């Protein structure tokens, strides 16, 4: 069987982007975060109890392209950037589709996912300002793993509040974070006032990202040398992830690939934004007509079922009010294996883009996504993370549509991470004991 020449498109280290792309520069009507007490737009000093100065500046920046510090760029190479763009040739054959399917391989990072792209930047900026400890939340554990590892490069300690449902489902994620030197607490925990408050009213809760964010923020607020580091949602995180999409655009140029669809899973928005925001810029410049699709779980369908309104980014009401699609800051999603997508809201930038018709959205039950993940693993030999399975499922559906219509469309999706420490979930699926997320 002949493998096509475009089966794997790589870039040299020197071809990696030197600037991040900031979609906020091209969204002039973006609603600002509000101070919950005054209902006035937040000022930089409102963020400073939890973020370092450089992160605060980037969060509010309207500059279109922002330089990537050389030390960050050098360490991105250490994380196997630039990442390959690969053709899912065997999956195409199994599906008997005329469609061409490509996927961006964020799974090849030694950290297992795309999360290192922003973890590196945030750890670097905090270290530059003398911060000795970072606190954070994590859902499935990919973000906590990334921050725990890269913090070692800058001599920073890390404390992670891991959503209890995932903490219990994914013990190997805890092992990785502990190996990298992080302290890990199941959230809600007994180490914060807010955690104890939640446990007093609901001791059996599986937790949520909103609760874990509140706990991490509380710890950061109590120590001037401790800052909070966020894995998704806010603008600066979306910014740092755009190396993914910029690399993908260059690889598609080299391979003469004109995508009809670009697809990524979406929870808080970081992987989706990183992969698609550079293409949104191309669309605004009328250089592409590609359809951009966000894929979310039915257990936390903020885009497909939420409301666009101001809401807290956390459950405890410690963050500014954000204009976003939300299911309500007190919403606790069902305990699905795609823990990184179990968030009540959506990035304000992703939300604004959705509100402006720049993307479409679809949601799936976890049984559907694991079925797609198993099919992809059999075809390509790669076990996708439960979050990434959502993008795989949408790509398969589009490819099957092409099988019916006979159209030779091009589908490009982001494989945001591998699922090698999520095999317990796959085991449940294959044994038939996994529950539908609609039950």
Image (cartoon, rainbow, N blue to C red):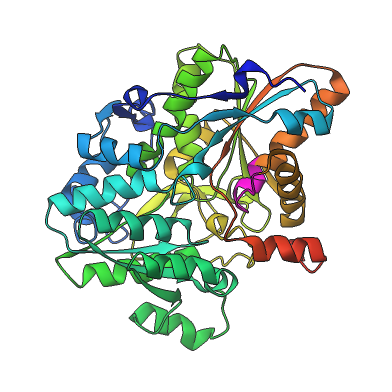
Q: Position of residue 268 (x, y in %)?
A: 49, 50
If the image is split into quadrants, where does the C terminus sit? bottom right
Q: In this image, 78 relative to 366: left or right?
A: left
Residue drawn at (32%, 51%), measured in percent from left and top? 34
Q: Position of residue 91 (x, y in %)?
A: 75, 34
> Is 127 in the magenta?
no
If the image is split into quadrants, where does the N terminus sit? top right
Q: Position of residue 176 (x, y in %)?
A: 44, 65
Q: State which region is magenta.
A: 382-391
Chief SS of the magenta region: loop
Q: In this image, 38 relative to 104: left or right?
A: left
Q: In this image, 279 relative to 236: left or right?
A: right
Any part of residue 357 in sight: no
Any part of residue 243 in sight: yes
Task: Write down the quadrant of residue 59 in the picture.
Answer: top left
State how many labels appear: 0
Residue drawn at (63%, 68%), measured in percent from left and top? 335
Q: Residue furthest front?
A: 1
Q: Position of residue 42 (x, y in %)?
A: 25, 50
Task: Write down the quadrant of residue 393 in the picture.
Answer: top right
2 lies above or below 342: above
Relative depth, front residue between 323 and 141: 141
Relative depth, front residue between 395 and 182: 182
């Amino acid at each position: 069987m002949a493998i096509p020449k475009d089966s794997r498109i790589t870039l040299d280290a020197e071809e990696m982007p030197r600037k991040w792309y900031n979609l906020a520069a091209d969204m002039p009507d973006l609603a600002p975060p509000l101070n919950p007490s005054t209902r006035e737009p937040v000022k930089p000093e409102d963020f400073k109890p939890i973020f370092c100065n450089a992160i605060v500046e980037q969060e509010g920046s309207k500059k279109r392209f922002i330089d990537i510090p050389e030390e960050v760029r050098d360490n991105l190479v250490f994380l196997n950037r630039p990442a390959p763009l690969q053709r899912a040739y065997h999956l195409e054959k199994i599906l008997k589709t005329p469609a061409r399917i490509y996927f961006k391989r964020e799974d090849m990072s030694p950290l297992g996912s795309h999360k290192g792209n922003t973890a590196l930047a945030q750890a670097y900026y905090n270290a530059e300002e003398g911060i000795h400890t970072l606190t954070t939340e994590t859902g499935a554990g990919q973000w906590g793993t990334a921050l725990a590892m890269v913090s070692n490069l800058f001599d920073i300690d890390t404390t992670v509040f891991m959503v209890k449902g995932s903490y219990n489902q994914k013990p190997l994620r805890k092992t990785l974070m502990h190996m990298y030197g992080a302290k890990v607490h199941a959230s809600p925990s007994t180490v914060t006032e807010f955690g104890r408050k939640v446990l007093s009213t609901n001791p059996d809760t599986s937790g949520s990202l909103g609760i874990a964010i509140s706990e991490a923020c509380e710890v950061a607020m109590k120590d001037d040398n401790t800052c909070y580091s966020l894995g998704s949602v806010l603008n600066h995180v979306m910014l740092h992830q755009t190396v993914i999409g910029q690399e993908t655009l260059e690889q598609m140029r080299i391979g003469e690939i004109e995508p009809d669809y670009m697809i990524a899973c979406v929870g808080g928005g970081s992987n989706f934004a990183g992969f698609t925001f550079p293409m949104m810029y191309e669309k605004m410049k009328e250089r592409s007509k590609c359809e951009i699709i966000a894929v979310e779980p039915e257990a936390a369908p903020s885009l497909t079922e939420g409301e666009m309104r101001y809401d807290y980014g956390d459950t405890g009401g410690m963050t500014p009010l954000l204009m976003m699609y939300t299911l309500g800051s007190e919403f606790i999603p069902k305990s699905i294996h795609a823990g990184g997508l179990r968030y009540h809201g959506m990035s304000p930038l992703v939300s604004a883009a959705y509100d402006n018709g720049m993307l479409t959205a679809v949601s799936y039950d976890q049984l559907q996504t694991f079925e797609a993940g198993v099919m992809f693993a059999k075809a390509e030999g790669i076990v996708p993370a439960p979050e990434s399975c959502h993008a795989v499922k949408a790509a398969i559906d589009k490819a099957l549509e092409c099988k019916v219509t006979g159209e030779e469309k091009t589908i490009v999706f982001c494989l945001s991470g591998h699922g090698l420490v999520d095999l317990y979930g796959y085991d449940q699926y294959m044994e038939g004991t996994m529950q539908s997320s609609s039950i």
